[in-house]
Image (tube, grey):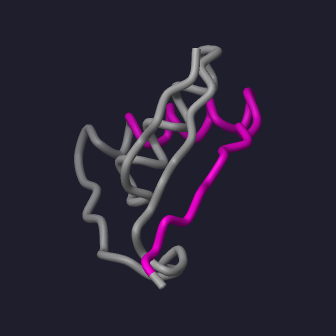
Amino acid sequence: MRVLISGAGIAGLTAAYWLRSYGFAPTVVERGPSLVTGGYKIDVRGSALEVLALQLHFSLEVGTARLGLVSASPE
């Protein structure tokens, strides 16, 4: 099943990653001219560290998903 995701921020790319891993075919569209290489700092503490460690372990076992990215920036 094809899925269109508007926005190539952390939420859009994360949604695309997980949808792809469950057999969907996500396409991410972004209005900006390019992907931003920097971003906001993320503060991870307490139990969130355990969740992050589990996520990283799972991601390393599964590998990375290929995501379709389309830039729809106005010219």
In front: 2, or 35?
Answer: 2
**Residue at position x 74%, y 29% from top?**
61
Is residue 62 inside the magenta stretch? Answer: yes
Per the rendered image, the range of residues in magenta is 51-74
Is residue 55 inside the magenta stretch? Answer: yes
Depicted 55 relative to depicted 19: above or below: below
Q: State which quarter of the image contains the N terminus.
A: top right
Furthest residue toward front: 75
Quadrant housing residue 64:
top right
Quadrant housing residue 47:
top left
**Residue at position x 49%, y 65% from top?**
72
Left or right, 28 with respect to 59, comes to: left
Quadrant housing residue 20:
top right
**Residue at position x 46%, y 36% from top?**
4
Question: x, y percentage for residue 54?
Answer: 50, 32
Q: How many marks?
A: 0
**Residue at position x 73%, y 27% from top?**
62
Question: x, y percentage for residue 33?
Answer: 50, 80
Question: x, y percentage for residue 18?
Answer: 52, 29
In front: 9, or 41?
Answer: 9
Depicted 68 relative to depicted 70: above or below: above
Left or right, 63 with respect to 44, comes to: right
